[in-house]
Image (cartoon, rainbow, N blue to C red):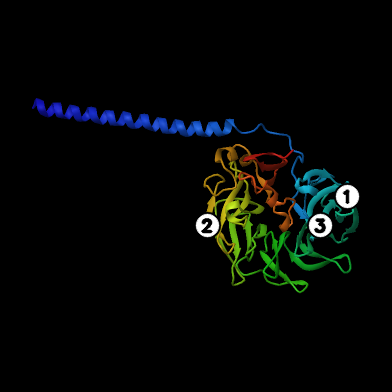
Amino acid sequence: MRMILKSKSKGKASLRFLLVALLFYSFIILSCAQDSIFFDISHEPEPRSPLITGTPTNMVLVRNELFVGSRMSNKIFRFGGAGGSPEWSSIQQIGGSLGDLASDGQYLYALVFPDGNPLSSSVIRRFNTAQNVWDEEYSMAAFSIQTIHGAGGRLFAGAMLRADRQNFAILYLAPASSSLTVIKNNTFLLTGAVSAGGGTFLSTAGAGIFRYSGGSVETRPVSGTEDANIAGIIETERSVVAVSSNGTIYSLTTQGIFSSFSTRLTFTGALSTWGSRENNWRPSLLLAGIRGRGTSRVNGYREIVLDMNGLATNIIRTPGDDSHSSVRHRARYTASIGLHPVEAIMQLPDAARGGPLNYSAFLSDPDWEPPIFATTSRNGLWSYRNRSWNAEE
C-alpha cells in the first residue's frame, strides 16, 4: 500500500514539474515576442511634419512627374526633376479651394471651388506642365462638379445636378470642342475611371461599373457589378480590379464580366499595384487602403495577392506578415501608417511607365526599393523609404 501511494506521489510531482516547465517556457516565448515588438517600435523613426498637411488629394502622374495637393487649400505640389533625383516643388496657385486632380496623359487638371463651397460653384482648370501655366477652364452651369478622373487619354467628371442636389451625371471633356458634355444622366457619383483591354470602365458609388466606348456609356452596368458602391478601381496590367466600401472585391474576367468575393474590411478606395525586384517589378500585390469600422483603430492598408492574370485572389495580408511584402516589419508598419486611414496610395513607377524615377539608376544597390507614397485622412502625405513609413518632408 505504501508503494502505491509513493508511486502516485511521484506521478503528481512529475506532473507539477511539467506544468511549471511549460509555463516557464511559455513565458520565455511570449517575452521574446514582446521584446521583438518593442524592439521594432523603439527603432521606429521619430514622427516628422509632413510637407503636404491635412487631407491630401489623390496622386496623379503627368509626363513623368507626380502631382498631389492639399484638399480644400490652394496648394499643389509636384515631385520630379531631371537627372534621376526628383525633388518637391510647388506650382502656381489655383484661385480657389482644391478638390481632385486628374490627367489625360498630357495635361494636369484640377477641380477647383472658386468660393470655397463645393456645392456652390465648381470649375475644372487645366495646367500645362511644360509651360507652367493654367491655360484652360471648363464648367457647366447646371451641374456642380464633385470628382474628376482620367483614363485612356480622356477626362471624365462626376457632377451633381444643382436643381435638386440628388441626381448625378457623368461628364466627358470633349477635346475637339474643349467643352464638357453629359454622357450619362440619372446615375450615382463617379468614383473612378480606368482603361484596359481596349475598353474604358467608369465606376460609381451605387450603380456599379459601366463600360465606355464609341463616345457613349452603355445603358447597363457590367455584369457582376449591378448596384455596387464602388470606392476605387485600378488597372493591374492584365485586368481590372475594383473595391467597394462594404468590403467586396471585384475582378474583370476574360469573359468580360466581373467576379467578386466579400471581405470584412472597409475599403477607402485607395489602390496601387506593387512589384518587387525579384519579380522584375511586375505587379504581384494590390495595396488597398482601409479604414477601421466603428471604434476600431485598425487602419492603413492591406496587401491583396494577384494571380498570374492580374485578378485579385482571396489571399489578403497585413503588410509584413509574409516575406513577399511591401514592408519588412509588421510592427513598424502597425505603429506608423497602420494608425491612419489611407485615402490614396502609389508605389512610384519606373520612368518607362510614366513615373518620376529611373529604376536602372538604383539597381547597383541591392536594398533599394521604389518609394511608396500614401495620403492619409487629416495627417498629410506619408512615404515608405529606407524600410520605414513616415511623413514625407
Relative side of 11 to 19, left or right: left
Considering depth in this image, is 206 or 315 the residue closer to the camera? 315
| Residue 276 seen by the camera | no
Instruction: Give how far apart the Cα atoms at labels 3 and 2 are.
Output: 36 Å
On the image, numbered disc 3 is attached to which residue?
A: 145
Question: Which structural element holds mark 3?
Answer: strand
- Residue type at mark 1: give it: Pro
On the image, the x and y values in percent for residue 278 come to 57, 53
Q: Which image quadrant is residue 130 in?
A: bottom right
Placement of 261 over or under 115, stated as above or below: below
On the image, the x and y values in percent for residue 207 come to 68, 64
Dot 3: few (<14), some (14–19), or many (≥20) neighbours within 10 Å?
many
Relative side of 13 to 86, left or right: left
Considering depth in this image, is 95 or 230 the residue closer to the camera? 95
On the image, numbered disc 1 is attached to which residue?
A: 114
On the image, numbered disc 2 is attached to which residue?
A: 314
